Image (cartoon, helix red, strand yellow):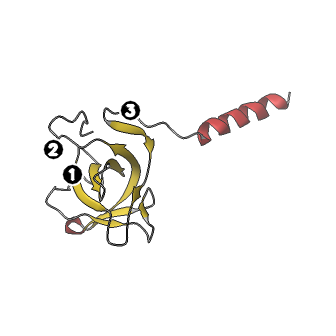
Amino acid sequence: MMRTPILIGATLAAAIAMPVSAQSLSGVSDTETTIPYASDGGIRQIVKGNGDVLFMRDRTDHWYRVQTNQGCLRHYDQSMTVLVDTKNSSRFDRFSTLRVPQLAIMCGVASIRASEAPPQVDSKSVVTLD
């Protein structure tokens, strides 16, 4: 009798520990990634998506869809400055933060996935802003 609760508990613990798969979005990878970040910077362009989404272009012209923590960018305007803090790392990852000085806010990074250019940059893009 003792084995059943232990097996159920072990199965439940394994299910909780498994990463949640990313929602599939057209033109966006389903796999999490990082953005290489040199000492002189790594982000060339930032484009606002919907909600808490930013699209970032790195120094090698690769695009990424960056999801910040919920509600962080609700007052962000494309004309505002975004500062990147990689925590002295050589990459922008989920431990990095974004600061918007005009709003005095700091946003955490929930997800980074490779992406095609957003529609504001490429009118033929299949990427949605969500």
Question: Closer to the N terminus: mark 2 or mark 1?
Answer: 1
Question: Closer to the N terminus: mark 2 or mark 3?
Answer: 3
* 74 to 50, vertically: above or below: below
* 16 to 90, vertically: above or below: above
Q: Position of residue 35 (x, y in %)?
A: 39, 56
Place residue 84 in its image quadrant.
bottom left
Task: Name the residue type under label 1.
Answer: Val
Task: Name the residue type under label 2.
Answer: Gln
Task: Name the residue type under label 3.
Answer: Ser
Identify the residue position indicated by label 3 in the image: 24
- Disc 3 crowd rating (10 Å Cα; few below 14, some 14-19, many 20+) is few
Q: Residue at x 61, y 42 (%)?
A: 17
Taking the image as shown, residue 86 lies to the left or right of residue 119, namely right
Pointers 2 and 3 in contact (CB under 8 A)? no
Q: Position of residue 101 (x, y in %)?
A: 23, 69
Q: Residue at x 38, y 45 (%)?
A: 113
Q: Give the spatial CA distance, label 3 vs label 1.
A: 20 Å
Identify the residue position indicated by label 1 in the image: 47
Identify the residue position indicated by label 2 in the image: 120
Along the line of sight, the residue nearer the viewer: 126 or 86: 126
Numbered disc 2: secondary structure:
loop
- Disc 2 crowd rating (10 Å Cα; few below 14, some 14-19, many 20+) is few
Numbered disc 1: secondary structure:
strand
Q: Residue furthest front?
A: 60
Place residue 46 in its image quadrant.
bottom left
